[in-house]
């Protein structure tokens, strides 16, 4: 295919326009110079309405999205967003409220936030929830800032180390570093869990806390979790739960009861709010009563008369986000929880785990498992196909595009060479899973028999394989007609 | 996987190599490390004069796959930096023990525990499984 859609500036010609304004009947005035851009970007493209419409519709049709294909990104959890959520989020009562509107005029929105705090707390076993953070990573920052504030508040300033397993997502160590704490890496054991001896050796009076994803990034349950939490607490540290994989244990295990002190919920993963380019994220956080005074505000509480009001916890670390978090995401998450109910949420996790294990068992003869265990909601395989020469996971991922699938997460977690991390989620049925499995099996055969087909992939996508190295080494960060023409010429 | 591990160097668990040249020491990342990272696209190195503490991070290396810290295998003062790498990182992938060197150091005598080539080969082998 490799069909080229011109840039909107290339479609532009002076004088074309989409609307006809009435003739000017007042004296023309120049814009104040203070309001003019000073960076030379004063031109806007000039096009007719059909040109604009067709341009953007054509681009949208080239998009890969859960609306057109299975999207098995592991860890990033691309669930389908039910269309009902979109409708509810667009109700004028939610979509048209202004965050500066008086509380008395926003009671419905505040009630929704209050109920969502309550539901998330109940599902995870935590006392208090703040809906402020805008993504998982920001939830992590919130948690570790709260840990730091908690230790300082107790007059214990020397707790400056955060333990992070080597399988963790990069946002965990980055968070600890951003708070100004020292990252202490923990090894994984042969079963893909935290190495308990290493944990014992690295706990100390300097331990501020530990960050752990459970199920972890290998898609495996940390079955020593209760002991891990005990050890960290005995050392005086706190347990942070990275909730990226919470969708595997809804209604089955409550992190707050397992011993975690704080956790984030990726509403854009577990609770289906749109992800990536589809919408802003939401990384609400929950914690124990002990840490609740440190949560970012404002939170919502109910007054004695039954109305709802905003308040800021007494020792709050401060705001993490303007206004009330990404409110429209909260509406979607609330709708999801209310539509499914407690039993439905548990079923979500059960089916997610079943689907991942179905894929795992059907593929493990061709794609070696990172760890030979029953997995949770995602399975980590290796793109190391027996008998295939010079084939890497990247080639397999690109070939999947030709088969009509978005590739899974690749090269993560970093401790697994040639990792292929597949998360089907509960939203895929057996028919789709079987087609996916067949595609993966066909690709494994091609990898041995016709490896160039993989090296050349994708061939049916609107663009061919990108030169990622050149893009990173010589990035062109702003539209530049000359550079563009040169790149097109080279193709 | 055939990884080059020269016999005359010493190696750290975080995959840096160390070569003694008279009074000074040259360090870089190993062939194993460059292979695991893939094409390097960015590197941040300390300024000449910086004093390194063994085991502490002294810079950042980024490939299309990952971004990692670089850890000092030995302590000492940086006397030269391979600044050509800022504009062109290819030597790190193509010649990690030669043109891809990172720093030249006047050692302080403090060191992380380092491995010889045989021990490092076993360490790489262990992680390939
Ligand atoms: C395990 C894990 N932790 C944390 C994060 C960060 O979450 P977010 O992307 O919402 O910032 C991710 C992101 O994919 C993740 O997979």
Image (cartoon, helix red, strand yellow):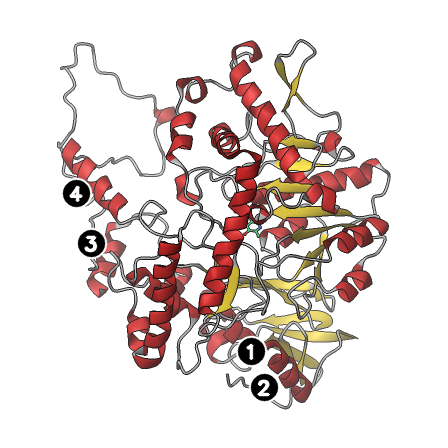
Q: Specify the label residue A4 is tagged with.
A: 3
Tag 1 near tag 4, CB within 8 Å:
no
Does mark 1 have its CB less than 8 Å from ligand 1? no
- Location of residue A482 by image quarter: bottom left
Above or below residue A193? Residue B75 is below
Query: How much space separates mark 2 and mark 1, taking CA atoms?
Result: 8 Å
Tag 4 near tag 2, CB within 8 Å:
no
Q: Specify the label residue A354 is tagged with.
A: none
Residue A274 lies left or right of residue A13; in this view the side is: right
Above or below residue B20? Residue A433 is above
Above or below residue A443? Residue A29 is above
Query: How much space separates mark 1 and mark 4, taking CA atoms?
Result: 48 Å
Tag 2 near tag 1, CB within 8 Å:
yes
Judging from the image, mark 2 belongs to the subunit labelled B
Residue A260 in sight from this viewpoint: no
Query: How much space separates mark 1 and mark 3, taking CA atoms?
Result: 39 Å
| Mark 1, secondary structure of its residue | helix
């Amino acid at each position: 295919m490799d069909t080229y859609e011109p840039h909107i500036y290339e479609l532009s010609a002076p004088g074309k326009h989409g609307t006809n304004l009435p003739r000017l009947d007042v004296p023309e005035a120049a814009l104040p110079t203070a309001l003019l851009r000073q960076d030379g970007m004063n031109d806007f493209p000039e096009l007719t309405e059909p040109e604009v419409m067709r341009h953007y519709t054509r681009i949208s049709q080239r998009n890969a999205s859960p609306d057109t294909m299975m999207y098995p990104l592991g860890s990033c959890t691309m669930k389908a967003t039910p269309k009902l959520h979109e409708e509810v989020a667009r109700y004028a009562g939610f979509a048209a409220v202004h965050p500066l509107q008086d509380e008395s005029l926003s009671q419905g929105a505040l009630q929704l936030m209050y109920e969502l705090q309550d539901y998330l707390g109940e599902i995870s076993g935590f006392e208090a929830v703040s809906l402020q953070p805008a993504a998982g990573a920001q939830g992590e920052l919130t948690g570790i800032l709260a840990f730091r504030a908690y230790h300082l508040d107790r007059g214990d300033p020397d707790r400056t180390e955060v333990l992070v397993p080597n399988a963790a997502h990069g946002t965990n160590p980055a968070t600890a570093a951003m708070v100004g704490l020292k990252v202490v890496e923990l090894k994984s054991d042969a079963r893909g869990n935290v190495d308990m001896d290493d944990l014992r050796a690295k706990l100390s009076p300097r331990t501020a806390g530990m960050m752990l994803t459970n199920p972890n990034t290998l898609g495996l349950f940390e079955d020593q979790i209760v002991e891990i939490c005990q050890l960290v607490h005995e050392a005086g540290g706190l347990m942070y739960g990275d909730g990226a994989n919470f969708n595997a244990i809804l209604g089955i295990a409550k992190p707050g009861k397992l011993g975690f002190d704080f956790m984030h919920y990726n509403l854009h993963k577990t609770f289906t709010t749109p992800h990536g380019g589809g919408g802003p994220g939401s990384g609400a956080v929950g914690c124990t009563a002990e840490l609740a005074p440190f949560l970012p505000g404002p939170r919502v509480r109910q007054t004695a008369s039954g109305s709802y009001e905003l308040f800021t916890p007494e020792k709050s670390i401060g705001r993490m986000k303007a206004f009330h978090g990404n409110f429209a995401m909260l509406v979607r998450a609330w709708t999801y929880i209310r539509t499914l109910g407690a039993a439905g949420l548990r079923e979500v996790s059960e089916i997610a785990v079943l689907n991942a294990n179905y894929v795992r068992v059907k593929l493990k003869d061709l794609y070696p498992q990172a760890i030979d265990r029953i997995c949770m909601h995602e399975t980590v395989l290796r793109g190391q196909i027996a008998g295939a020469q010079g084939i890497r996971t990247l080639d397999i991922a690109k070939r999947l595009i030709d088969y009509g699938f978005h590739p899974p997460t690749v090269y993560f977690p970093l401790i697994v060479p040639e990792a292929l991390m597949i998360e089907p989620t509960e939203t895929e049925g057996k028919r789709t899973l079987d087609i996916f499995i067949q595609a993966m099996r066909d690709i494994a055969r091609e990898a041995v028999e016709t490896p160039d087909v993989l090296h050349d992939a994708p061939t049916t996508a609107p663009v061919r394989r990108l030169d990622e190295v050149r893009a990173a080494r010589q990035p062109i960060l702003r539209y530049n007609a000359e550079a563009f023409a040169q790149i097109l010429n080279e193709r | 996987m055939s990884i080059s591990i020269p016999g005359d160097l010493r190696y750290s668990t975080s995959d840096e190599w160390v070569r003694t040249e008279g009074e000074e020491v040259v360090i870089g990342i190993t062939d194993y490390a460059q292979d695991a990272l893939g094409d390097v696209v960015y590197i941040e190195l300390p300024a000449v004069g910086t004093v390194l503490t063994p085991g502490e991070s002294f810079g950042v290396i980024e490939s299309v796959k990952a971004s990692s810290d670089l850890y000092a295998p030995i302590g000492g003062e940086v006397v030269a930096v391979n600044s050509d790498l800022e504009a062109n990182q290819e030597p790190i992938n193509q010649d990690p023990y030669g043109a891809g060197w990172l720093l030249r150091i006047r050692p302080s005598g403090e060191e992380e525990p380092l491995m010889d080539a045989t021990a490092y080969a076993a360490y790489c082998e262990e992680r390939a499984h």
